[in-house]
Image (cartoon, rainbow, N blue to C red):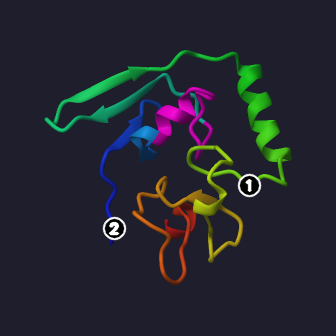
Amino acid sequence: MFQLSNIANLDNCIHSFCFKCIRKWSRNSSACPNCRSEFSEILHKNKFGFTCRFKIEKQFKEQVQDQLNLNEMNFLAPYCEICGFPDREDELLVCDTCNYNICHYQCDGLTGIPQGSWSCHRCRQ
């Protein structure tokens, strides 16, 4: 089984993410990409084993909800379920199990587009 390196956790839920991806996500939203719980810190263990805390500026709830509504309405531009961005379409994977969730292969901790089928984090649980 593949294991993620450079993992970050959020202070208000149990979900783990690629550190760079969740930092990028936090510039636009303070809601967990999976469960939508509001978070105020990203917890990241550095290479020396120390946990670093990165404080997130709280956004107005209306701004977060507007961003979520925009993502839900944006059917023409698929976006990554983890980082929330529609860029790098050539690197997006569509889940072969649910045929719904989409993710950049790097955001899922992969080093390249997998050969054969791929399942999203929700279908793997």
Relative to residue 49, is residue 40 depicted above or below?
above
Three-letter residue code for mark 1: Pro
Q: Nearer the viewer, residue 117 or 90?
A: 90
Q: Are marks 1 and 2 in contact (CB under 8 Å)?
A: no
**Residue at image location 30% in from the left, 51% down from the top:** 5
Label 1 and label 2: CA atoms lie apart by 25 Å
Residue lying farthest to the bottom in this orientation: 116
Indicate the position of residue 70 as horizontal and vertical percent values: 81, 38
Q: Which mark is residue 57?
A: none
Indicate the position of residue 92 as horizontal and vertical percent values: 61, 61
Q: Nearer the viewer, residue 14 or 24?
A: 24
Check disc 1 and report its element: helix, strand or loop.
Answer: loop
Relative to residue 60, is residue 111 depicted above or below?
below
Is residue 32 part of the magenta span, yes or no? yes
**Residue 122 image-quadrant placement:** bottom right
In the picture of the structure, the residue carrying the numbered disc 1 is: 78
Indicate the position of residue 111 as horizontal and vertical percent values: 39, 63
Q: Quarter holding the N terminus? A: bottom left
In the picture of the structure, the residue carrying the numbered disc 2 is: 2
Q: Nearer the viewer, residue 111 or 31?
A: 111
Write the start and end of the magenta stretch as one range: 21-36
Residue lying farthest to the left in this orientation: 48
**Residue at image location 62% in from the left, 53% down from the top:** 88
Q: Nearer the viewer, mark 1 or mark 2?
A: 1
Relative to residue 60, is residue 86 depicted above or below?
below
Residue 93 lies left or right of residue 66; in this view the side is left
Residue 18 lies left or right of residue 95; in this view the side is left
Three-letter residue code for mark 2: Phe
**Residue at image location 34% in from the left, 56% down from the top:** 4
Is residue 125 part of the magenta span, yes or no? no
Relative to residue 72, is residue 25 depicted above or below?
above
Indicate the position of residue 121 as horizontal and vertical percent values: 52, 61
